[in-house]
């Protein structure tokens, strides 16, 4: 299954030319005449990127890009512009566009940029998968186990955790064991990695003496 | 001296005086008779000539009576004397009528009829109307001459004859009074007064001679000579006046000749057949032809054959008493040419419709006009270049689109042909698209170049719809980038126009660009072509804020602008171009509140005065 390139350009000739160019290079291509058409279409769950014209009637290229960023879309965007527009380009790059190419874009440059964008897509998709996995595991924890987990990754010792939570050290050890099992972690290092992927903040123990801090 | 005096005395003064009277009367009669022969409407002169001749004849008969040998001869002469008296009577009445241009016709006719009756009675009487019986002749000395006087019985009809004289007098006085009232007082006094005075005297003398035995000869002719002399003096005043008039005319003529030849323009007169009859010096100077060569010229010889219809039209206009005007290149001597404004009006000379006119050298004006055109063309070109500058970015975009498509297609094609499963139809499509996009790019470049190149104006058949297409193609990118929708509504089958396509496209571009600037994002512009009456109308309507009503009249004025960065030259140039095409450009508020610009074009280019093609 090939990677997918979306193309949004109001100029039919350009649109079809690009499709042929990329299809001949081995990509799947989907073309749209306007940003609205593109938004109306459901994105496929595969490694993909978007080649976006700048000036279009209706929603312009940068408008669409802004919207995608707001929606936290992972789709990498390559702008293809009819003419250079420095302020617009800076804006686009700041918002995370992969690159801005000038029409007519050189074949090698276009393919290289598309490849880079797809690579970015692949990486971000991979990362998104890791995150969702980590989050899924964290969700298995009970509230008490989450409390223990957040203190463990903060480097607190069992007795301090017990003191904080007002439970005996033995119970802490028990919770800690089930956290390791539920998160499929083999070491504290694994726990820290999963916490960072899932976005779990560590919680410092209140009773910990400053000298015992990490 | 003594011998000279005694010699004259032996002839007798009466003989000398009467002979002189005959000579004077006859001379005056001949002079004024000749005047009448030359000018048949000079009736007063004819009457005067008759009066003078009658007076001469009266003198002849009187002289004969003075020397009558027998009583019978005297009576016979006395009878014939009344014939010249009769003619004198009639001509005096006629003279009064024609010279004073007054008098009662019935009075004149009555007087003449009665005098004629008197003449008939005169011939029916035993002797004449004066004497019933003539018994003898008495000889007396009169002015040193021995003359005969009558002795006999008076004819009572003499009263009738004398009263007809009084009737003539009444007629003359009445005519004088009328004439006086008509503001010809001098003539009235002289003619009326003289006639009354001398006729009165003549009547009195005749009565005296016969009735009172005055023992004097008939001297009636003296009184008539008095009339003749005063009338001659009066008529000679006319002569003097015409002499003065001739002098005045001579002076006027000198002045007019100087004007005629000194005026910085050609003056000419043509016969109804178009032959050159008269001309001033300027014609010889400007044309280089001599008078002998000009005598052979026809109106059509001056102009090129293709201008003949123009000449004929102007000539026809002049013949209808309008001012005929043409501007043509005149053919001068030695095959040289010069632009002239030729005018002509009809002048009826001797009842024939001649053409009189003025020709003015237009080369200086033509030069100025050419310079003006040149600067206008320069301005229009600057405007086009600056319009192109505004459009440069979007035109680059317009060019890059097809170039991008071509490049993509070419790359795709070159990869596709290396595949084992070659899809020939797809490759054919690719080539087709490449060719189409190439053409699209070429059109943009062509449209651009036609606006940038400063070429000499050429009049050609233009299709308005093609101009609309071409202008829209150039601004399409600009409109898209500004989020403006362009809508085209062209009428099919528009009549072709004569004009300059580039200039008309420039007008349309200016109007569309203005509209794009006015409407802003999400604006909508409708470019329309249609036939309105005898014109082709092209309109550009936008849905922008419109132009305030108080600015509408000034919007086409140079250096007037409502734009922040506008120069105020675009619309004036549009107006110049449209006017030069014989059309008009207008602006008004559109129904949707936006601005509506439109220009109407007729058949072809306006050609000023025929030759100046702008």
Image (spheres, coloured by chain):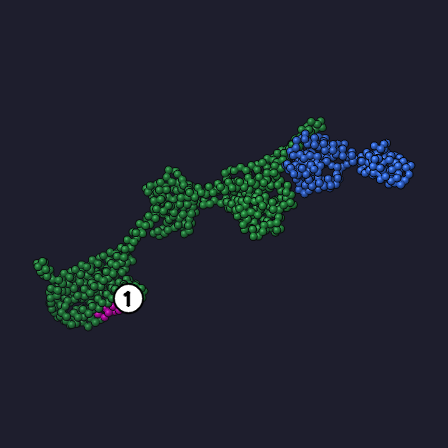
Give the quadrant of residue B24.
Answer: bottom left
The chain letter for the residue carrying disc 1 is B
- Relative depth, front residue between B546 and A86: A86
Q: Is residue B165 magenta?
A: yes
Q: Is residue B118 above or below residue B459?
A: below
Q: Is residue B264 above or below residue A183?
A: below
- The answer to whether any part of residue B93 appears in the image is no
- Relative depth, front residue between B482 and B566: B566
Q: In this rendering, would B95 be left or right of A79?
A: left
The residue lying at 29 percent from left, 54 percent from top is B248
The residue lying at 37 percent from left, 39 percent from top is B333
Q: Position of residue A72 (x, y in %)?
A: 75, 39
Q: Position of residue B538 (x, y in %)?
A: 57, 46
Q: In this rendering, would B154 be left or right of A90?
A: left
Q: Is residue B96 magenta?
A: no
Chain in blue in the render: A
The residue lying at 38 percent from left, 48 percent from top is B357
Q: Which residue lies under the disc numbered 1?
A: B176
Q: Is residue B53 above or below residue B445?
A: below
Image quarter in which the C terminus of chain A is found: top right
Prevailing secondary structure class for the magenta stretch in the rendered image:
helix
Per the rendered image, the range of residues in magenta is B162-178
Give the quadrant of residue B120.
Answer: bottom left
- Relative depth, front residue between B110 and B402: B402
Q: Position of residue B34 (x, y in %)?
A: 24, 56
- Relative depth, front residue between B110 and B443: B443
Chain in green in the render: B
How many numbered marks have been drawn onto this rendered protein structure? Answer: 1
Q: Secondary structure at mark 1?
A: helix
């Amino acid at each position: 299954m090939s990677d997918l390139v979306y193309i949004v350009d109001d100029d039919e000739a350009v649109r079809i030319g690009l499709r042929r160019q990329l299809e001949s290079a081995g990509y799947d291509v989907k073309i749209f005449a306007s940003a609205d058409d593109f938004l109306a279409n459901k994105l496929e769950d595969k490694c993909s990127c978007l080649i976006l014209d700048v000036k279009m009637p209706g929603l312009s290229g940068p408008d669409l890009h802004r919207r995608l960023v707001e929606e936290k879309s992972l789709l990498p965007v390559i702008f293809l512009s009819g003419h250079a527009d420095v302020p617009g380009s800076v804006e686009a790059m700041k918002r995370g566009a992969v690159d801005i190419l000038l029409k007519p874009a050189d074949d090698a440059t276009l393919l290289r940029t598309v490849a880079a964008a797809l690579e970015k897509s692949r990486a971000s998709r991979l990362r998104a998968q890791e995150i969702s996995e980590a989050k899924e595991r964290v969700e298995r924890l009970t509230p008490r186990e989450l409390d223990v987990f957040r203190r463990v990754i903060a480097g607190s010792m069992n007795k301090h955790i017990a003191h904080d939570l007002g439970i005996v050290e033995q119970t802490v050890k028990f919770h800690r064991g089930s956290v390791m099992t539920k998160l499929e972690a083999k070491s504290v290092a694994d726990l820290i990695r999963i916490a960072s992927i899932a976005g779990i903040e560590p919680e410092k123990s209140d009773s910990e003496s400053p000298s015992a801090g990490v | 001296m003594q011998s000279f005096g005694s010699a004259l005395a032996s002839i007798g003064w009466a003989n000398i005086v009467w002979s002189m009277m005959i000579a004077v009367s006859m001379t005056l009669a001949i002079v004024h008779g000749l005047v009448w022969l030359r000018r048949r409407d000079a009736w007063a002169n004819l009457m005067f000539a008759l009066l003078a001749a009658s007076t001469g004849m009266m003198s002849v008969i009187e002289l004969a009576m003075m020397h009558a040998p027998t009583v019978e001869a005297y009576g016979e002469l006395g009878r014939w004397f009344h014939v010249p008296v009769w003619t004198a009577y009639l001509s005096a009445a006629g003279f009064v009528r024609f010279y004073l241009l007054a008098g009662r016709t019935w009075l004149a006719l009555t007087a003449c009829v009665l005098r004629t009756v008197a003449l008939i009675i005169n011939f029916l009487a035993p002797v004449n109307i004066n004497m019933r019986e003539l018994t003898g002749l008495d000889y007396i000395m009169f002015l040193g001459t021995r003359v005969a006087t009558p002795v006999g019985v008076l004819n009572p009809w003499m009263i009738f004859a004398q009263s007809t004289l009084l009737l003539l007098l009444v007629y003359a006085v009445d005519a004088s009074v009328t004439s006086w009232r008509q503001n010809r007082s001098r003539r009235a006094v002289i003619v009326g007064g003289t006639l009354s005075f001398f006729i009165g005297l003549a009547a009195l003398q005749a009565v005296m001679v016969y009735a009172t035995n005055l023992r004097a000869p008939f001297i009636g002719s003296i009184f008539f000579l008095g009339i003749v002399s005063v009338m001659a003096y009066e008529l000679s005043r006319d002569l003097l006046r015409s002499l003065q008039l001739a002098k005045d005319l001579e002076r006027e003529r000198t002045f007019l000749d100087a004007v005629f030849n000194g005026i910085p323009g050609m003056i000419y007169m043509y016969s109804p057949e178009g032959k050159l009859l008269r001309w001033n010096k300027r014609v010889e100077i400007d044309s280089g032809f001599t008078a002998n060569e000009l005598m052979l010229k026809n109106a059509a010889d001056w102009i090129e054959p293709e201008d003949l219809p123009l000449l004929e039209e102007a000539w026809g206009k002049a013949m209808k008493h309008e001012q005929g005007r043409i501007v043509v290149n005149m053919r001068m001597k030695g095959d040289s040419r010069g632009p002239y404004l030729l005018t002509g009006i009809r002048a009826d000379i001797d009842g024939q419709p001649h053409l009189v006119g003025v020709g003015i050298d237009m080369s200086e004006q033509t030069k100025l006009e050419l310079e003006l055109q040149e600067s206008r063309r320069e301005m229009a070109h600057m405007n086009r270049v600056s319009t192109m500058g505004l459009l440069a970015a979007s035109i680059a975009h317009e060019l890059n689109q097809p170039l991008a498509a071509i490049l993509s297609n070419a790359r795709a094609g070159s990869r596709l042909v290396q595949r084992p499963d070659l899809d020939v139809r797809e490759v054919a499509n690719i080539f087709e698209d490449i060719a189409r996009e190439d053409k699209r790019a070429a059109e943009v470049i062509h449209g651009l170049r036609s606006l940038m190149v400063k070429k000499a104006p050429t009049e050609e058949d233009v299709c308005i719809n093609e101009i609309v297409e071409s202008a829209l193609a150039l601004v399409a990118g600009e409109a898209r980038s500004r989020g403006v929708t362009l809508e085209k509504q062209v009428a099919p089958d528009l009549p072709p126009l004569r004009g300059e396509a580039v200039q008309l496209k420039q007008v349309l571009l200016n109007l569309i660009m203005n509209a794009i600037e006015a409407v802003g994002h999400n604006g909508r512009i409708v470019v329309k072509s249609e036939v309105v009456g005898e014109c082709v109308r092209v309109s550009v309507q936008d849905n922008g804020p419109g132009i305030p009503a108080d600015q509408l009249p000034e919007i086409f004025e140079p250096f007037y602008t409502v734009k922040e960065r506008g120069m105020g030259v675009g619309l004036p140039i549009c107006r110049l171009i449209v006017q030069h095409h014989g059309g008009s450009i207008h602006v008004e508020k559109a129904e949707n509140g936006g601005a509506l610009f439109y220009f109407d074009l007729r058949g072809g280019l306006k050609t000023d005065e025929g030759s100046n093609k702008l």
